[in-house]
Amino acid sequence: MPNPSSSFFRNGTFLSSGLLLLVVLAMLPPFVSESVAGALMAAFDPVCHQIFSRSPHIHDTAFAVCHRCFGAYVGLFAGSVLFLSSRGRVLPSWKPLLLLGLAALPGVIDWSGDVVGIWINTPVSRIITGGWFGVLAGMLLAAAVLRQKA
């Protein structure tokens, strides 16, 4: 376990907390006033299509992101925590762009199969493939921020 006073642990905790805040902000629209929900939707709009039928929702109010983006945000947080708790030992020593490409592949396959009519992807498949990508991206982000070799 890392020394709680170390800059690695302190900076990693700050990073993970910020990523958790993104998850919470993405989930807030069903629980806040319309004006706050509208501001959150507008804030996430540049990074997500926010199609209602492809977004988690509670009582007919959608989260600020779609299923795949929500999985990616949760994965970013989980990946940063995993990297921090292992002090970077869980991250393969491959090239970061190769790792990201491999992590994106399940999402591309899930999306492509739906587009060409081989199968219909589901909220679960979109969350899982987004999460898979997010976990690896979170580990790579933590490695970069904490200046560890990736």
Image (cartoon, rainbow, N blue to C red):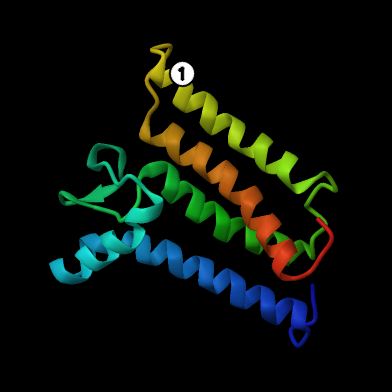
Residue pushed farthest bottom?
Answer: 5
Is residue 33 in view?
no
Q: Quadrant of the C terminus?
A: bottom right
Q: How many marks?
A: 1
Up/down of 81 relative to 121, above or below? below
Is 108 left or right of 22, judged from the image as shown? right
- The residue shown at (52%, 66%) is 19
The N terminus, quarter of image: bottom right
Q: Which residue is mark 1?
A: 113
Kind of residue at badge 1: Gly
Residue 61 % position (x, y): 19, 53
Mark 1 nearby-residue class (10 Å; few <14, some 14–19, many ≥20): some
Residue at the spot x=50%, y=39% of the render?
Answer: 128
Which of the 4 quarters of the picture holds residue 94? top right
Element marked by disc 1: helix
Q: Is residue 133 left or right of residue 34?
A: right
Quarter of the image for residue 105 reads: top right
Q: Residue at x 31, y 56 (%)?
A: 64
- Residue positioned 33% across, 60% down in the render: 27
Viewer-closest of 122 and 146: 146
Q: Residue furthest front?
A: 46
Q: Is residue 33 above or below residue 41?
A: below
Looking at the picture, how far across and down is residue 85, in whole percent? 72, 65
Residue 65 in view here: yes
Asked whether, in this view, residue 123 is left or right of residue 98, the answer is left
Name the quadrant containing residue 6. Answer: bottom right
Q: Nearer the viewer, residue 126 or 4?
A: 126
